[in-house]
Amino acid sequence: MMNLTAQTPAPTTPAVIGLTSIEAEERLAELGPNTLPEPEPPSPLRVFLIQFRNPIIYILLLASALSFATGRIEDGLFILVVLLINASIGTYQEYSADRAAAALRKLEQPSARVIRDGVACRIEAKRLVVGDLVLLESGDRIPADLMLVDASDLRCDESLLTGESMPVAKGRTVEGSSDETASSMLLAGSLVTRGRAKGVVTATGTATMLGGIAAELGRASSSLPPLVARLAKFTNALAVFVGLAALVLVVAGFMRGLPLHDLVMMSVGLAVSAVPEGLPIAISVALAVSMRRMAARNVIVRSMPAVEALGSTTIIATDKTGTLTSNVQTVTEIRLPDGTDIALDAHADLDKCEIRASGLDSDLVRERARRLLRAALLANEGTLARRDDLWVAAGDTVDVALLAAGRKAGLGQEELNDRYPLAARIAYEPEHKYAASFHHGSDRIHVFVKGASEVLIEMSDRMDSAGNVVEIDRASLLAQKEEMAARGLRVLAFAEGEIGASLAGSLGHGHLVDLVLLGLAGLQDPVRPEVPNAMKDCHAAGVEVVMVTGDDPRTAAAIARDAGLSFHAGQVVSGHDIDEAARAGDQRLDEITREARIYARVQPTQKSAIVASLIRNGHIVAVTGDGVNDGPALKKAHVGVAMGLRGTEVAKESADLVVTDDNFASIVAGIAEGRAAYRNIRKVVLMSVATGAAEVLLFMLALPFGLPMPLLPVQLLWLNLVTNGIQDVALAGGRPEGDELAGPPRSPLEPVLDRTMIRRVVQSTVVIGGAAFLAFQWMIAHGYGVPEARNITLLIFVMFENVQTLACSSERRSIFSVDILRNRFLLLSVLAAQTIHISAMYVPWLSGTLGLSPITPLEWGLSMLIASSLVLVTEVDKFVSRRSRDRSSHA
């Protein structure tokens, strides 16, 4: 059986044959890796100190100083201890998130194709050394400074280094160039926008021009994700509200004659408890955790905001090859121009298989097929050779498939290259839709062309019929091509011709004339087995899918059916249709994109117009791409998804996400993770805001009713310490619940605090704050001393907030149906909070500072019963919400 691996022999120039592995390792040890200097990440100490840059911290420090000044040493020390503990928790969260993000960035390592030990192989770009022979093609980012040794129609974008906006022509000698050295040098960091090339590495790492620039520049700080920025703004607004509430309480308490120190400390405690200043950090942790989970599912996140955006995606514009399909092309059929059909076994052993032809003229049929395959092998930039009893290959999958078909016909690429020495080559580019090669003959130049069938049928004026050259029958050939494409085959055409030897010095596109069409070949690229289920998941999740491909409409439609994409004939449009609609105006194009599900024969520029139109139609668009010209579409989309295996560096750098296995199912998995991250963020917001508001409500009810302060300032600080921070992170890092794809995506305009969240915040605030107030009032009225009443009220609040944390573990499911063990950290955080508070009752210094004391079993039972009331209210609300959603879904 054929086994295609990543290594294969590659043609080299006699003067430059690359390095051996031993030479490369020696130079790597001497010169170091081909990397640029990166600034050191902030140390834990610096992250710790940053935690104190917060207005709330300044208020607490002022309160601590006030306590020391008034002789309340224990209060002052306690505040300082709380500050240190909170700063330590924040340091751990932030430092861990930064380290996780840095580790994920390392997963996306750039690579380079080089000649090592006489064979072409792909290595990490950081392992390049001076003297390596690097192979480049359109879409590659140049990994080091290179001196060209060979180039074909080469253009490079050097705007990153020179500011020159137009691609620059490159070659060993460029006509009209004022600086021949500059024209033959390729600079690290620039992009190959067109053509092919080979170059020898002259400088790596900091020795390159890019390295010199990087050494002088520091990395700009990354901006906050939009959601984190919105929540930070919300936190500030909440702080203003809490400040006003605290001011009202201070005035009311002062009018009642309460000590000023106690009132100030109370306002400080309320501010710390009610304002979720750690919320942005918790959200960053949620996004960082999701990034790590996406990486485990083959999705590398290059931009943290993409986690949120991916979960909001309403439509995926996906390409076909390698994303929906396996990207393993096999020639299964050859159709000669007179209609003769030849079958080839898929995945057959190349050493044993031969072309099957039946009938009286089987020898002639085989010879005509070999003639077609000769053109396929000579106009070919791939390589296929035997190494250690295995067939190893490199190059475009179509080129490799054609080389394999040639082997089945008994043709070898090396023998053909020896027989027909190469004079010039036209590399395949999307705008041409063909590749060609020119070869020296005895007195003529032989021309061989392969490419899109409709293009070559139009370029040719004759065709092969039963071994004779006759006038071309374009209608018949196009009908054959349509029939093959309707069966899901990718159809290529092949042609040959001859030109005078005198033209050998100026060969190019203009010499592709008077061609003889040799026939068609059908290639098959099967749909990945997991794609149909992924399509079903998209449908269930309310995410539409459209296919955007350069293939023929019939081929695209056949593959789409196999992939499980639902569409009808009127929803298949071509690039020509897109051009006509664009000329008619945006409104006409938007009408097409509202209905279309398959876009075939689409050019990259048209792909960008499609994405823009989908956005105008109100979609949140995720688009996949792998080529140089996909960059604009990837940038224009809300979420750009680059292919990690076959994607160019241009596509990867334009994208927000990189799918390492080029698999559509991985994109769908990423959507599920994005939705899970957003759910976790809502859980943190609900828990933080509701419990903080409940504490404010407790005081706003107690003071106007003439009751003493229900909790001491240090008790408020303690409550914030044991019931926030760890629980926030536990909720933020919760695992997906499994039903993330069971409903439509959220509206991009939907606020975090939507109507459902506001209702639940109000419910929790009223239940927690109201029940705690009633309990405190009852205890004061029935003879409890103020310290004892505060002690039990504080316990009730700790229990309430732990129950609230558990209730928030799922926004939709009952607390009794949630598998708590799926988030062990959450369960441990709740148990730890309760244990720490109980332990504080028995630690002399701590219990004295906090005003805590052990309580009776009856008081324990009543406190637990009061806290459990929140479960009843929450469960009723969830039940009503589920019934409402069920009725809506069946309406």
Image (tube, rainbow, N blue to C red):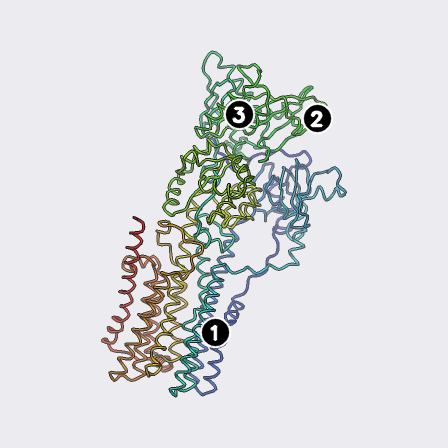
Report the number of discs.
3
The residue at the far right in this view is 178
Which residue appears at 48% of the width and 82% of the height?
65
Any part of residue 64 in sight: yes
Label 3: which secondary element: helix
Label 2: which secondary element: helix
Q: How far from the left and from the top, in percent, is residue 783?
A: 25, 84
Q: Earlier in the sequence, mark 2 or mark 1?
A: 1
Q: Earlier in the sequence, mark 3 or mark 1?
A: 1
Q: Residues within 10 Å of mark 2 (few under 14, many from 20)?
A: some
Q: Is residue 355 above or below residue 816?
A: above
| Residue type at the position of mark 1 | Ile
Which residue appears at 46% of the width and 31% of the height?
554
Indicate the quadrant where residue 504 lies: top right
Nearest to viewer (mark 2 / mark 3): 2
| Residue type at the position of mark 3 | Gly
Q: How far from the left and from the top, in percent, is residue 409?
A: 51, 22
Q: How far from the left and from the top, in percent, is residue 736?
A: 37, 54
Q: Earlier in the sequence, mark 2 or mark 3?
A: 3
Residue for badge 1: 56
Cα–Cα span, label 3 and label 1: 74 Å
Cα–Cα span, label 2 and label 3: 27 Å
Residue for badge 3: 406
Q: Residues within 10 Å of mark 3 (few under 14, many from 20)?
A: many
Cα–Cα span, label 2 and label 1: 79 Å
Residue for badge 2: 504
Q: How far from the left and from the top, in percent, is residue 290?
A: 44, 55
Q: Is residue 841 above or below residue 90?
A: below
